[in-house]
Amino acid sequence: MTTETGQILSGWIPYRLQHDTSARWMYMSDIPFTDPFFYDTLQKSKQLKENSSRYRCTASTDSLEEWSREIDSVQPSAFIFHVSRCGSTLLAQLLGLDEQHIVLAETPFIDELLRAKYKPGGKDMSYMLPSAIPFYGQKRNGKENRLFIKTDSWHLFFYEVLRDLYPDIPFILLYRRPDEVIASQAKLKGQHAVEGVIEKELFSLGELPPFHHSPNHYMAAVLEQYYTAMYQICQKDAHAHLMNYNEGFIHITEKVYALTNTELTAQRKSSFEERCEYDAKAPNEKFNLAPSAAQEIPGYMSKAFELYDQLDALRLAGV
């Protein structure tokens, strides 16, 4: 391979697996990765002429490792794990205000590589992540020096995989009270809040309440798994850092800057304050108050609250 290969691949990313043996590619040009979710950025890029042909750019996944060596890219600076509806999107947006940062917010291709083995007839493709991520971490304005990867919430169950691949970088574990998470999910459900959408093999939920009884019961059980996973991670990983939604996101973002040895200027902090006035998922809309916490905790949330309290005690103890 030559540097010419790197020039040819500049701006291109592998964005979809195809039969576990090849990947479809998309040209991103200079479209910034600043949308609340990476899926939205992909939708914009589909309008580019390079992606509008009836012919699709496809290459063997075996090429990823060799080609990625030719890409001028930024290595991951931190992974952001979360329990959903706990401000992870806002954190990603705040980090993305800096033009020196590349922020990947729930990137579909990363999810496909992690979950490939759970598909019918699938195989483990997670080992390809270090070859795929450099394409997403390409230096496009020449100023980039940090790459933050916000995961999907169920990627907590791939902690061991990601930690083996990236042994020393900070893992941010963001969480929130279960009643507040469930109240938000009740308004608009994520994939993991609907039984059967995410492969059940990822979870070890045991006997769940009947789905027809209340979808909130299912989400409470999912949160039990998330809190348990975070607790276990922090018991053994010195590079894992718990952060609670109720700390406030200017403070949380400052902590992420400190953990990644990133300079934080007064001007940048001022931009955080301005951005926090707007909704994380709808950046042009003013932020509304969070869903009200339950006046009385329903019985089906009791276990989730017990685990949440244990997790918060661990954070406050500085473990």
Image (cartoon, rainbow, N blue to C red):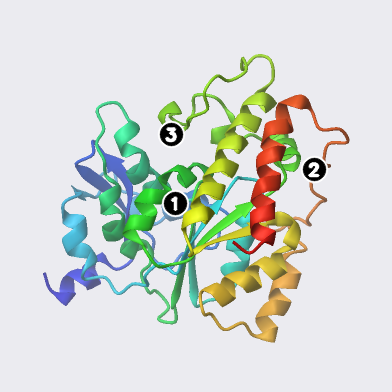
State the count of labels: 3
Q: CA distance from mark 3 to mark 1?
A: 18 Å
Badge 2 amino acid: Pro
Front residue of 39/317: it is 317
Q: What secondary structure is found at the residue carrying circle 3? A: helix
Mark 3 or 1 closer to N-term?
Answer: 1
- Residue 181 badge: none
Image point (26%, 40%), residue name: 124
**Above or below, 253 relative to 217:** below
Question: Would you say residue 249 is visible in this rendering?
Answer: yes
Asked where in the image residue 45 lies, by quadrant, the reply is bottom left
Badge 1 amino acid: Thr
Q: What secondary structure is found at the residue carrying circle 1? A: loop
- Mark 3 against mark 1, which lies toward the viewer? 3
- Mark 2 against mark 1, which lies toward the viewer? 2
Q: Is residue 148 left or right of residue 268?
A: left
Mark 2 or 3 closer to N-term?
Answer: 3
Q: How many C-alpha atoms fall within 10 Å of the one at disc 1: few (<14), some, or many (≥20)? A: many
Q: Position of residue 91 (x, y in %)?
A: 62, 62
Image point (51%, 74%), residue name: 260
Q: Is residue 152 left or right of residue 62?
A: right
**Badge 1 is on which residue?**
107
Q: Position of residue 212 (x, y in %)?
A: 65, 14
Question: Would you say residue 282 is visible in this rendering?
Answer: no
Q: What secondary structure is found at the residue carrying circle 2? A: loop
**Badge 3 is on which residue?**
202
Q: Quadrant of the N terminus?
A: bottom left
**Badge 2 is on which residue?**
291
Q: How many C-alpha atoms fall within 10 Å of the one at disc 2: few (<14), some, or many (≥20)? A: some
Q: Position of residue 237 (x, y in %)?
A: 47, 59
Is there CB contact under 8 Å for labels 2 and 3?
no
